Image (cartoon, rainbow, N blue to C red):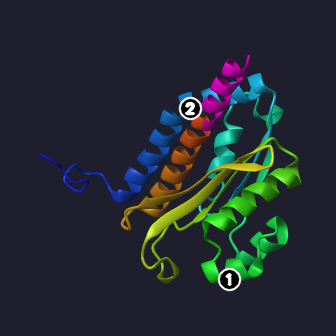
Amino acid sequence: MILKSSQIGVSSDELSVRSLIFFIVELQNLLNYIGSRMLKNDETISVAESVTSGFLQFSFSQMKDSSKFFTGGMTVYSQEEKSRLLNVDPQEAQEANGVSSLIAETMALNVAKLYKTDWSIAVTGYATPVEESKGKLYAYFSITYKGNVILSERLDLHSRTKAVNAQLYYTEFILGCFKLELDKLKQERIVSK
């Protein structure tokens, strides 16, 4: 038997708070792993985000000794700021409403240049269904390493996902993908020795 939140006396706002707490608790091992790999590799990372509203930057700031590898990031919502700060093509931004694979890749490549980092992550998308997204929730994210896009994907969510849950899910998924990229690099280094 499945109980609805209203049947067990929990409001949707309380579920959102619980989701945030669960997100933080569950991510701790992932954050610890990423932080230790970054320190061991003696590499740096920067972030450019839109839809996640700073959750990626927050996550990196929670890692032990993060100031040794996390150089900074920016949250850029508007198409104008994506163009001005991260050299996103204004026409592409206008045509795609600031949300496309190419825009995520451009954001990632340029935030890495701006902060002079080995790694970068960028994400842009929708946390609420709007007319421009045709009522859908999705995000594009890119991960770069040493000036090359190594992963660029689209992540789709159910259109009834609450905005904060969408942002948390995007963040967790992207960090999980970043961990996998760190693992691949570690394996490549072992094989090349």
Q: Quick one: which residue is furthest to the front in this view?
A: 192
- Residue at the far left: name it: 1
Amino acid type shown at disc 2: Leu
Relative height, residue 94 to residue 190 (above, below) = below
Residue 119 magenta-drawn?
no
> Magenta part of the protein: which range?
181-193
Looking at the rendered structure, the secondary structure element under dot 2 is: helix
Dot 2 corresponds to which residue?
A: 30
Image location (x, y in percent) of residue 123: 63, 58
Q: Nearer the viewer, residue 152 or 177?
A: 152
Residue at left offset 75%, top offset 33%: 66
Q: Does the image show residue 23? A: yes
Q: Quadrant of the N terminus?
A: top left
**Residue 189 marker:** none
The amino acid at mark 1 is: Gln
Task: Give SS at disc 1.
Answer: helix
Please give the residue where the numbered disc 1 appears in the rendered image.
94
Asked whether the beta carbons under mark 1 and mark 2 sit within 8 Å of each other, the answer is no
Q: Nearer the viewer, residue 189 or 90?
A: 189
Task: Say if the magenta span includes residue 187.
Answer: yes
